[in-house]
Image (cartoon, rainbow, N blue to C red):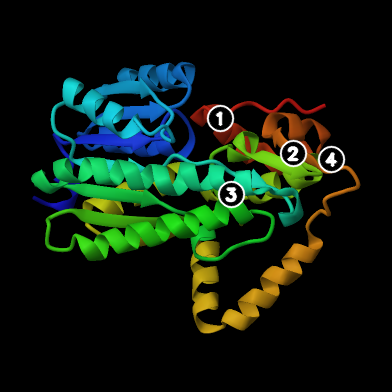
Amino acid sequence: MSGSQRFAGRTALVTGSSRGLGFLIARELAERGCRVMLCARGAEGLAAAEETLHRRGADVATLACDVTASDAPQLLLDAVHDRFGHLDVLVNNAGIIQVGPMSTFQEEDFREAMEAMFFSPLRLAYAALPDLRASAAGTLVSISSIGGRIAPPHLLPYAAAKFAHAGLSEGLRAEITGSGVTVTTVFPGLMRTGSHTAARFQGRPGAEYGWFAAAASLPVLSMNAERAARAIVRAAERRRPELVLTPAAKAAVRLKGIAPVTTARLLSTAGRFLPSPGKRPRRDVAGTEAARHAKLPRWVTALGDRAGRQYGEPRADRH
């Protein structure tokens, strides 16, 4: 079967698929003939995503589920089996983004990031492997991040968890070679999904939101998320082991490979220009609230805000 038809008639489970990149990957899989189980924490967002895909003729179902719960893998597999039968494609996409200086993070922040972006994908992969091994199109897609290759400042819990997820994905690929299961590890750079409103901020939330929202919205630094989703599904169809997305991310990976010392110096320099924690650092401020304290012209985040409205991210109302 050709790569473009490999997923036709198959069943996929996509975590974190009520909005953003996960929703777009689910939509792309559905357009290629997949039956899709959507999974996310919020029932309301899932219902909206399901309705949108149904209107496009997709065969989809949903399960509101916290993927960090110990019983989540069995709940998800049972839901897939009951609704569609066999599972062929698993996309581990769910995650969280915490933004702020290192000094504002506590151990619990790292544990939360690891639960969401390492242990949850690990448990779900183990639970899904029997189905994937039995499938003629068994595929595991791990959505890591460029932060899983190069650790940027002010994203330390996120980068640590994404490094771990990338290692898990690459290790699984080495372990199950010959089983018929394809493993694709994806390292996206910044994408315009509206994720700046779903992130959580620490230290001086308004200042942290300012640099992060700008980077996640400006076209030179970020990528159109629909193109990213198409590239991810195409790479999985073609059994590619790895995909790095956005020109900036590809350049950064190459630079680190040939000049690691220079890369380290550039990251350190960038860190010195990012906001200080402030005299009274705040913790765990939602992006929608941080936006109200950001001194950022609306045009800077216009593309990212528009993408957020399209792809279901929470809306930031700035004064």
Q: Earlier in the sequence, mark 1 or mark 2?
A: 2
Q: In which quarter of the image is the C terminus?
A: top right
- Circle 4: is it few (<14), some (14-19), or many (20+) Cα within 10 Å? few
Q: Which amino acid does label 2 sit on?
A: Arg
- Nearest to viewer (mark 1 / mark 2): 2
Q: Position of residue 269 (x, y in %)?
A: 75, 70
Between the C-alphas of marks 2 and 3, the distance is 14 Å
- Residue 56 seen anywhere in this rendered image of the structure: no
| Residue highlighted by disc 1 | 313
Give the labeled residue for mark 3: 110
Amino acid at circle 3: Phe
Going from the N terminus, do you reach mark 1 or mark 4 first?
4
Residue 107 appears left or right of 149: right
Which of the 4 image quadrants contains residue 33? top left
Q: Can residue 115 be seen in this view?
A: yes
Mark 4 or 3, closer to the camera: 3
On screen, residue 130 above or below 60: below
In the image, residue 128 sits, relative to residue 241, either above or below, namely: above
- The circle drawn on residue 283 is 2
In depth, the one of 173 and 35 nearer the eye is 173
Gap between marks 1 and 3 measured at Cα: 24 Å
Q: Element at badge 2? A: strand
Q: What is the three-letter code of the residue carrying label 4?
A: Lys
Q: Would you name the residue on which mark 4 appears?
A: 295
**Residue at (36%, 51%) from the top-left corner?**
142
Residue at the image point whose x is 52% and y is 63% from the top: 249
Q: Nearer the viewer, residue 176 or 44?
A: 176
Q: What residue type is labelled 1?
A: Glu
Residue 271 position, x and y percent, is 74, 63
Q: How far apart are marks 4 and 2 (CA)?
A: 19 Å
Checking the image for residue 230, the label placed there is none
User: From mark 4 to mark 3, how far is it between C-alphas?
Assistant: 29 Å
